[in-house]
Image (tube, grey):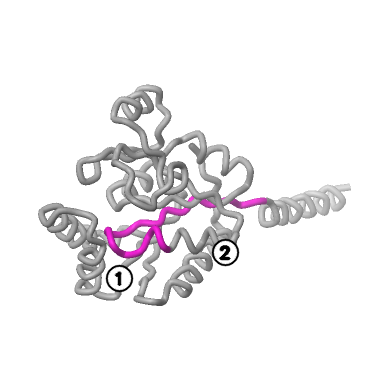
Amino acid sequence: MSIETSGTTQTDDVDEIYRNFTRLRPVLVVISGPSGVGKDATLALMKRREQPFYFVVTATTRPIRPNEEEGVDYHFVSVGEFAGMIEDGELLEYAVVYGDYKGIPKKHVRAALASGKDVVLRIDVQGAATIRKLIPESVSIFLAAESEEKLVERLQERKTETPDRLKMRIATARQEMKRIGEFDYVVINREDCLERTVDQVISIIHAEKCRTDWKPVSL
């Protein structure tokens, strides 16, 4: 009788192991890095790959730029609307970035994870630090240019800001590079190697889903 009980218990334990490794194991991935490293380009190509990821769209009070699309690049809102989202507890995280507010709508992240989808956040370095504290189960990836010279060159080529604001971006980018050790992974986004960058990011996501110590994200 004791042998049967022991056998049943062992079988149940093995069944539980299989259930843990065969069920949906969504991960929350933070893609960050200084301005000019190619975060937007990386996410755009990831979307074209048609992977089953949920890409969170950040809310911002920043004015819309040419070629940007509401609800795709950002949710563009007024300062008053953003304040309302803070008051109602609708944001997972928010911060002031270069004088404008940016925040992550909480309900979209929760719904995507509940459906079993991997959630991808494109966020600045400051916001990434906040997410790591709020969600220790998150996976953080730091995108970097191949050199400081190349990073400055990319920022200069954008020509979207005044000289003073450009200087601020360059100074901020240099400080953000010093926080690279806070992240789980680093991916070097080399010039004309975007396909390789995206391959590496997707490989990291797949590897994280296979971890023996995987834990579900709780919000």
User: In the rendered view, would you say 154 is above or below 72?
Assistant: below
Residue 159: in magenta span: no
Label 2 Cα neighbours within 10 Å, binned few <14 / some 14-19 / many ≥20: few
C-alpha span from label 2 to label 1: 22 Å
Position of 88 relative to 41 (above/below):
above
Range covered by the magenta-colored residues: 24-41
Q: What residue type is labelled 2?
A: Arg
Assign a secondary structure to mark 1: loop
The image quadrant of residue 206 is bottom right
What percent of the width, then of the height, locates residue 42?
A: 43, 63
> In this view of the protein, which residue sits in the foreground, 27 or 22?
27
Classify mark 2: helix, strand or loop: loop
Q: Nearer the viewer, mark 2 or mark 1?
A: 2
Q: Which residue shows up at 57% across the image and 43% down it?
A: 113
Q: Residue at x 72, y 56 (%)?
A: 18
Q: Which of 192 and 20 is in front in this view?
A: 192
Q: How many marks?
A: 2
Tag on residue 37?
none
Instruction: Indicate whether residue 36 is drawn in magenta.
Output: yes
Left or right, 130 with respect to 216, comes to left
User: x and y percent of residue 104 in the render?
Assistant: 40, 40
Residue 159: x %, y % from top left? 22, 60
Within 10 Å of disc 1 (Cα), the crowding (few <14, some 14-19, many 20+) is: many
In the picture, the disc for residue 49 is 2
Mark 2 and mark 1 lie on one chain; the one further toward the N terminus is 2
Q: Residue 170, percent across and down? A: 17, 60
Q: In this view, does 105 lie to the left or right of 36?
A: right
Seen in the picture, residue 131 relative to 21 is either above or below; the reply is above
Farthest left residue in view: 164
143 relative position to 12: left or right: left
Residue at the farthest front position: 66
Residue highlighted by disc 1:
145
